[in-house]
Amino acid sequence: MAQPPILMLQDIRLTFGGTTLLDGAELALGPQERLCLVGRNGSGKSTLLKIVAGLIEADSGRRFLQPGATIRYLGQEPDLSGFATVRDYVDDGLAPGDADHSGQILIEALGLTGEEDPARLSGGEARRAALARALAPEPDILLLDEPTNHLDLPAIEWLEATLKARRGALILISHDRRFLEALSNATVWLDRGTTRRLDRGFAHFEDWRDEVLAAEEKERSRLDQRIAHETEWLRYGVTARRKRNMGRLRALQNMRDERRNLRRSAGTVSMAATEASASGKRVIAAENVSKSFEGRPIVRDLSIEINRGDRLGIVGPNGAGKTTLINLLTGNLAPDEGKVRLGTQLEMVSLDQRRAALDPNETLWRTLTGGSGDTVMVGGTPRHVAGYLKDFLFLPEQARSPVSALSGGERGRLMLARAFARPSNLLVLDEPTNDLDLETLDLLAELVADYSGTVLLVSHDRDFLDRTVTSVLVAEGDGHWIEYAGGYTDMLAQRGARPGASEPKEEAKRTASPDKGKDKPARAETRRKLSFREKHDLETLPGKIETLESEIAKLQERLADPALFTKDPDGFHTATKALETKAAERDAAEERWLELEMLREELESAR
């Protein structure tokens, strides 16, 4: 960090109910730094952020805030009670001297009017109002705890662009991998009560974390070998039999204490879906399906065929009707027009985004067993409920606790545990990533990608969609839905606009045809040639990409020097910024080349 920190935490310690949550945690934030705070669910990230905000006082340690610096904090559950309108709530967060109109500008940018009653807001609307309140004063330090929760993709991408344009400092907690990669330039890892810092963005975090854990495991192995050697001496050594060497004995005891104190990292979820026998080849066939509510079209004349093994992602703004569409496709809701035919031998398991299927007064034990016995059938094999809960990182003492005592992330894991214990060949996942930590998200993505059955997935997580689905169904407005091959990024390349735009490209409309396998006559507007600029870009972009890759490799090699930051902090930050810029230029060039290459192939096939 080239400039003096605007905020600093030193040796922060905090204990809750006899359990040490923070044990010497530290954090430093530069004036324009964008820092992401990462760690497992329950590791204390939100608590540490509240200490940064001054909302919680640590048991010990030091908090320094540069005099005059302003802070705004967005928690996971903002409290809007006591305000007549959203505008009143947002304006209440302004300080003397702040522009009165800034709050209203942000309110409207986030899709609200300001006249809404806070008591009647949905989760997404409440989150937008809280964002407007946090951003309006343009604070020196902005603290955001899971800001993308309940937001749809257009809002997430608006927020991403807005935060990129800010000049102030930022500390961010999020489970949205793409969001973290786009915004962060430094990472703090909170693990087992302590913090480690990486002076690079989240895109580099996981490789670094794995190196740290591998080094820890290697050190544990060496310590185990030394303990075994000294124990052997203690039991059988000639000197030990004749007289005790008390110095060596004390050294052995110290090594054992060190081994006990070298705590292992948090456990990993053991996740596997119980798969039923294969369904029929055709899983869902919808023909000219339409559905409206109070005159508003939710689905208009949709025809789609979903076959065994397809993994369909469904995306669109909040209120577009994604959950309604899921209910139509699975037969839980009758269409106004058209028909939906379900295939044979279907065994469906659903995961509800609202966790409505969980009884808050029921224990985890009874939630999984249904109140009978102490075993859970998983893949046809009985598992003791305590052991199965352990696979999903629940402690034995939590088994008899009520669901109401669980955090949002823990409820998500419980829903997954219950869903995956049941045999299925059709998984219906409605926002399954809510509140899950990054490691659990990785495992869930692998499970979905490897699932041999069929998947219907509603998600606002761009990275999760890219890693799991084979096609994306997008809400285009006025009840129209269009299917695109590939993941979220592939959809953008084909569509040329973000979800929520009013007019899709004509080539995307053709891919929406229910007769995907039939050749269609080319439309008149596609019978054109590549422009001179398009031809030039198509020919020169590969060379530009190659040059950028070479420059990126040189920057990465320079930054790989562990002594660079100590010797030349300004040079380190310059190289880091240059690496981010070059990587962004390369990504944009690759996306442009892919778009032009697809256009060229389409024009040639239309001749």
Image (cartoon, rainbow, N blue to C red):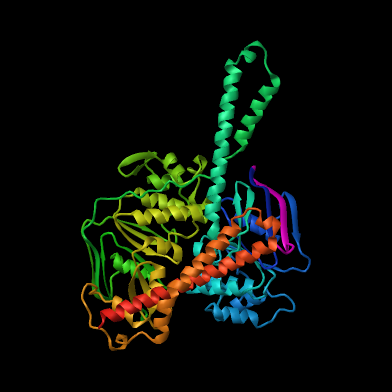
Q: Residue at x 54, y 35 (%)?
A: 221
Region in magenta: 1-18
Against 451, residue 538 (above or below) is below
Against 538, residue 44 (above or below) is above
For the residue pair 483 and 520, the one nearer the viewer reads as 520
Which residue lies most toward the bottom here?
524
**Side (left or right) of 20 relative to 420:** right
Give the image location of residue 425, x and y in percent. Answer: 28, 55
As for residue 2 lying within the magenta part, the answer is yes
Give the image location of residue 267, x and y in percent. Answer: 50, 44
Give the image location of residue 215, x and y in percent. Answer: 56, 43
Q: Which of the 4 image quarters holds residue 70?
A: bottom right
Q: Residue at x 60, y 59 (%)?
A: 558
Against 319, residue 365 (above or below) is above
For the residue pair 512 and 581, the one nearer the viewer reads as 581
**Side (left or right) of 54 relative to 132:** right
Residue 319 visible within the image: no
